[in-house]
Image (cartoon, rainbow, N blue to C red):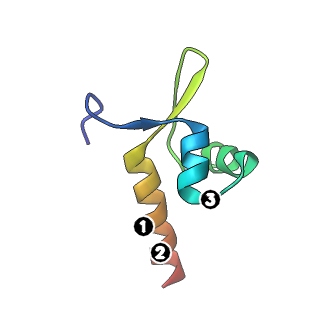
Amino acid sequence: MSTAIAELLTVPEVMARLKLGRSTVYDLIRSRRLVSITIGRARRIPADSVRQFIDNEIEEAA
């Protein structure tokens, strides 16, 4: 993944994609199940991190 072209999502965008609440998304970030970066005061999650999280969850469920 090239960080220069990585799509960065806001917490509300991740909430919508995963159909989860704000506190759950922040719990996933805190537990490092979702990678995030901070730019100034803004928290951003790479779209690849969301895809990887989904893949990991599917793998664990199998």
Q: Secondary structure at mark 3?
A: loop
Q: Closer to the camera, 61 or 14? A: 14
Q: Nearer the viewer, mark 3 or mark 2?
A: 3
Left or right position of 41 against 37: right
Q: For marks 3 and 1, give the CA distance.
A: 16 Å
Query: Local crowd at mark 1 within 10 Å, few (<14), some, or many (≥20)?
Result: few
Residue 14, position as x, y percentages in the image: 55, 47
Residue 19: assigned label: 3
Q: Secondary structure at mark 2?
A: helix
Left or right position of 26 against 2: right
- Which residue appears farthest toward the right when viewing the image? 23
The amino acid type found where label 3 is placed reads Lys
The amino acid type found where label 1 is placed reads Asp
Q: Residue at x 43, y 49 (%)?
A: 49
Name the residue tied to disc 1: 55
Name the residue tied to disc 2: 58
Vertical side of 40 occupied by 55: above or below: below
Q: Residue at x 61, y 41 (%)?
A: 12
